[in-house]
Image (spheres, rainbow, N blue to C red):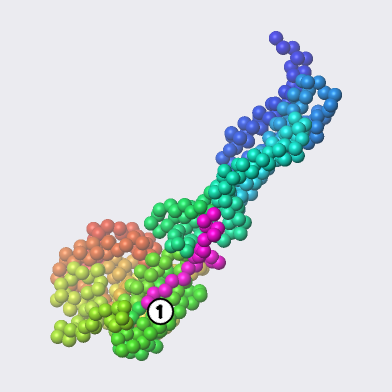
Amino acid sequence: MLSYDDVRAMLIDPMVQTGALAVIGAVITRVLLRKHPTRRLVGQLLFFSALTALLLYHGIVPYEPGPPGASSLQRVFIGIAKIIWWTNAAWSLISVVRVFLIFERQPREGRLIQDLVVGVIYVGALLSVIAYVFNAPVGTLIATSGVFAIILGLALQSTLGDVFSGIALNLSRPYAIGDWLVLANGIEGRVVETNWRATHLLNGANDLVIVPNSDLAKARLTNLSSPERSHGATVTVRFRPTTTPSVMVDVLRSVFLSSDCVLPTPAPTIQVTSLDASAVELELSFRVVDMSATGRAKNEIFDLVYRHARAAGLVLSPSVAGDGAPSAPAKADDVSAPRRSTPLRLLDAMPLFAALTDEEKEALAATMIRRTFRKGETLVEQGAVLKSLMIIRSGAAVVTQRDKGQEQELEHLAPGHFFGEGGLLTGAGEPGAIRALTFVVVYEVTQDGLAPLMRDRPTLAEEIGAALSRRSASDLRLAKASAKATQVETARGLAARIRDLFDL
């Protein structure tokens, strides 16, 4: 059995102290803290400092050759201690590198540079061990390994080309993770990773395209996300020359005012690109927040162009064939067909009243009231309970919500959009104030005008309730409605509230 003196001698033995400290440091930093890079760095530095102090206390200098008069056992111990010290030094420097890149919030983008730095640190630690532990001439070793380096370089010429191209791309930074690139050969996609050999692009079809770094370094590429994330887009429309181009430009300005996707800065532009006897061609240029929003923005612009053009009486022109002539002759309007009134056409376009018969729509249209609002005028205040359904006939408006002293835009309204259905059908207040961005014309469906139809056909409550419940959950006016409205979710609940409101 070990005596107290034996235990004490073991504890003060430099070999035992160094080994115990190395094992404890490795377990804590490499195992327990491996998922916590910041704590791991702090622990690594603390243990490295303690190890350095312990070796210096026992007269062991890791960066100097061992004492020449030491015994064989002492030289082995000193060599092991130096190897442990240089290994911990390399780990500490690597932890600093990795934590720095994570603090930059771009760990994948810095992967190549990170690997290079880590490789240099390991090579430096290995050469230091060779020099200070084995007392080998490092310079001679490097010189004699040059021949092998040349042979290896010739064998890995293509791979090394990709590696050095990757280094050049990381240093020059022509793109970053998340940027959308278009190459000269037609390849395009969003950068998701850059490593030693290649750059990975995710294209629009969600397929991974791997481009070797050497090819990318020589290619002509367009970075659609630089110098800023916003991206420009254009849309071309053609109208029949039934009015002056300046009127068409004014109508298309309302398109931009009604858009939720187009950035207000820089201001979108409208340019008349051609004018002939068959059509006036205009080009709409605008910016969106990111390349990925281009498709959604164009869909919205086309929808708004149709709404505003129809409201202003503009007629779209046929497309142009290769010889410059219209691809199909423009057909004259069918004058023999009876022309429906504006209120009827507005009701026809509303899914909310799809259950009404033609006779019911005509009766309701006869009660609709036309109202106008000047630019900047408030159509309705936030929280107001409207007793009418307002359908926008022409113009553009914006819905803004004030919360805790701050105002934010919810959405923009264009011809064909409507509001007030919550107050008319369920008694709910408006989620935000609505302000006219241009001269706005609305048609009002009053509760008194709708009540006779509801009493004559009580089943309309269920049909209108079902149509109201099918409104998209992403619609901001419903999603951000008052608590009284958000409690109503099902068609049956909406129908019950409608019956109560109209005393059915």
Q: Quadrant of the N terminus?
A: top right
In the displayed structure, does residue 110 sit left or right of residue 83? left
Q: Is residue 284 above or below residue 196?
A: below
Q: Is residue 440 above or below residue 427?
A: below
How crowded pointer 1 is (Cα within 10 Å; few <14, some 14-19, many 20+) is rated as some
- Residue shown at 39% from the left, 88% from the top: 246
| Number of numbered tags placed on the structure image | 1
Compare residues 316 and 20 and report the one nearer the observer: 316
Q: Quadrant of the C terminus?
A: bottom left
Q: Which residue is mark 1?
A: 283
Magenta range is 214-236
Q: Is residue 410 above or below residue 369?
A: above
Q: Position of residue 116 (x, y in %)?
A: 62, 46
Whether residue 235 appears in magenta in the rendering, the answer is: yes
Compare residues 5 and 189 and report the one nearer the observer: 189
- Residue shown at 77% from the left, 18% from the top: 9
**Residue 196 visible, this orientation:** no
Compare residues 457 and 395 and report the one nearer the observer: 395
Q: Position of residue 103 (x, y in %)?
A: 61, 51
Please tell me whether mark 1 sits on a helix, a strand or a loop. strand
- Residue shown at 65% from the left, 46% from the top: 117
Amino acid under label 1?
Answer: Glu
Whether residue 336 appears in magenta in the rendering, the answer is: no
Furthest residue in direction right, as rendered = 69
Location of residue 173 (image quadrant): bottom right
